[in-house]
Amino acid sequence: KASIQPVYGSAVIFAHNTKAKINGFTLVGAPGQPAVSVSAGGSEAPDFEISNSIIRDSDIGIVVSLPQGRFALNRSLVMKNNQAIIDAARGNLALENNTIVDNQIGYYLNESAGVHILRNNIVVNNRVDGILVSALGKKTVLKMHHNNVWGNARDYYSYTDRETFTPDGIGNLSIDPVFSSEGKFRLIGSSSMIDAGDPETKDPDGTRADVGAYPFSADSRTQAESGFFSSLIRTLFGR
């Protein structure tokens, strides 16, 4: 992926009342800055989207403070940030099919208005909180379903109330996603994330959506089986 890593400021700033999309980049903010900053004023509702990207190694991965409009993050990996995603949007925010891993805090909701949808995401191994809300009353605007939140120091936590909570919504899991050993956060064939997403959503191959940024594919299965049998032949016959 092409990389944007500035010396100063954010890698990407969405700040006008327009429609804009980022696809297929690695985004890293300058020291102390968010990798992605999303804000807009004026009378027109903006429509911003990031897809198939990696947001990493920043103080804040993404900060969203839209008073209106839409921001969507799809099929992206958010990793090794201090705070991965800060959501203060009063418009619509949608996180769908992302993997949020190895941050201090995975997702932080600090807004009591708007529509905030988390669907088909893996949120794992974040060192403080997986899903953090500023107060339990604000989780009523958080629409979570078919996510896997697991292995975080606290999976679901309210900052103000100082207590854990259970999310509303169906299909939410808390189990080991079983990534491959390559360190790229891809699923292996035995993962329970396969076909565990919202039945109304599809993977690129037309099957029911997997949970996480990277769907398991028939090609992955074929490559794994081919590697296994090649290794077996070498062991048995010295080839």
Image (cartoon, rainbow, N blue to C red):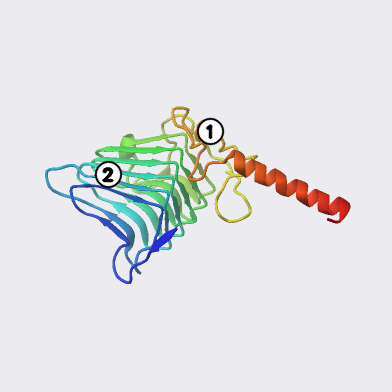
Outermost residue to the bottom: 7
The residue pinned by badge 2 equals 111
> Where is mark 1, residue-wise?
196
Task: List x then y, in percent, for residue 75.
Answer: 44, 45
Coordinates of residue 108 in the picture (x, y in percent): 36, 49
Q: Is residue 86 above or below residue 145?
A: below
Q: Residue at x 46, y 29 (%)?
A: 170
Comparing marks 1 and 2, which lies closer to the viewer?
A: 1
- Amino acid under label 1? Ala
Numbered mark located on residue 230 in the image: none
Q: Image point 18% across, 42% down: which residue?
A: 45
Q: CA distance from mark 1 to mark 2?
A: 29 Å
Q: Secondary structure at mark 1?
A: loop
Q: Is residue 91 left or right of residue 84?
A: left
Relative depth, front residue between 217 and 88: 217
Amino acid under disc 2 = Glu
Contact? badges 1 and 2 (CB < 8 Å): no
**Residue 140, placed above or below residue 62:** above
